[in-house]
Amino acid sequence: MKWIVGLGNPGTKYANTRHNIGFMAIDELARRFNIEVKETKFKALIGEGRVGTEKVVLIKPMTYMNLSGETIRAYMDFYKASLDDFIVLYDDMDTELGKVRLRYQGSAGGHNGIKSIIAHTGTQSFNRVRMGISRPAPGRDIADYVLEAFPKADASLLEQTVERTCDAVEYALTHNFEQTMAKYNG
């Protein structure tokens, strides 16, 4: 079983913001895999299905970003789910829009959702797809930037980021994460 968590904030106010690119990827994976993400459990929306022989669970925490770890911990405890089968998808300002970076360990890098996951799991070692949103212009407030919708001019790069993320996740269903990193970080 693979369980994929996309980070974001709940509600229509945040739907198309940079901070919700993880939710956008979960929505695309749900479309690709024909999985409905609508069951409410563990302060999240969850959908389960099969991709080939692999059971796949898609999760969108409905806590705010800085409490995302609560959902991960609750899911792990209830299902005895392993972090080895976990992939988290989230926005990253240090990666350009249109690109993704995969890692299997590291610090939170200032990302509150990742800080929460590290705090609730007790480890920095878990699979992650950092989805590029680029940095704001110097002097720009970071909180305002990540909670702002993508401009129309960025639509094709946004689509490219989401597609590449979903391609990497799909590949990771039949390959280990090191192989996936080698293919999608290049």
Image: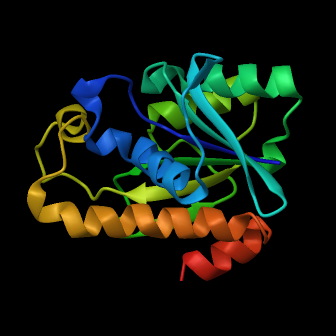
Q: Is 137 above or below relative to 108?
A: below
Left or right: 58, with 64 as reference point: right
Residue at screen point 46% across, 54% down: 28
Q: Quadrant of residue 176?
A: bottom right
State the image coordinates of residue 61 (x, y, percent, origin top left).
53, 27
Q: Quadrant of residue 3?
A: top right
The colour scheme used to paint the residues is rainbow
Left or right: 125, with 117 as reference point: right
Residue at screen point 84% across, 60% down: 53
State the image coordinates of residue 104 (x, y, percent, origin top left).
69, 57
Label count reads: 0
Regarding residue 97, the answer to whether it shows in the image is no
Q: Nearer the viewer, residue 129 or 27?
A: 27
State the image coordinates of residue 172 (x, y, percent, origin top left).
71, 66
Q: Is 139 above or below relative to 74?
A: below
Regarding residue 19, the answer to whether it shows in the image is yes
Left or right: 184, with 99 as reference point: right
Q: Quadrant of residue 115?
A: top right
Left or right: 143, with 182 as reference point: left
Residue at screen point 78% across, 70% down: 174
State the image coordinates of residue 130 (x, y, percent, origin top left).
49, 56
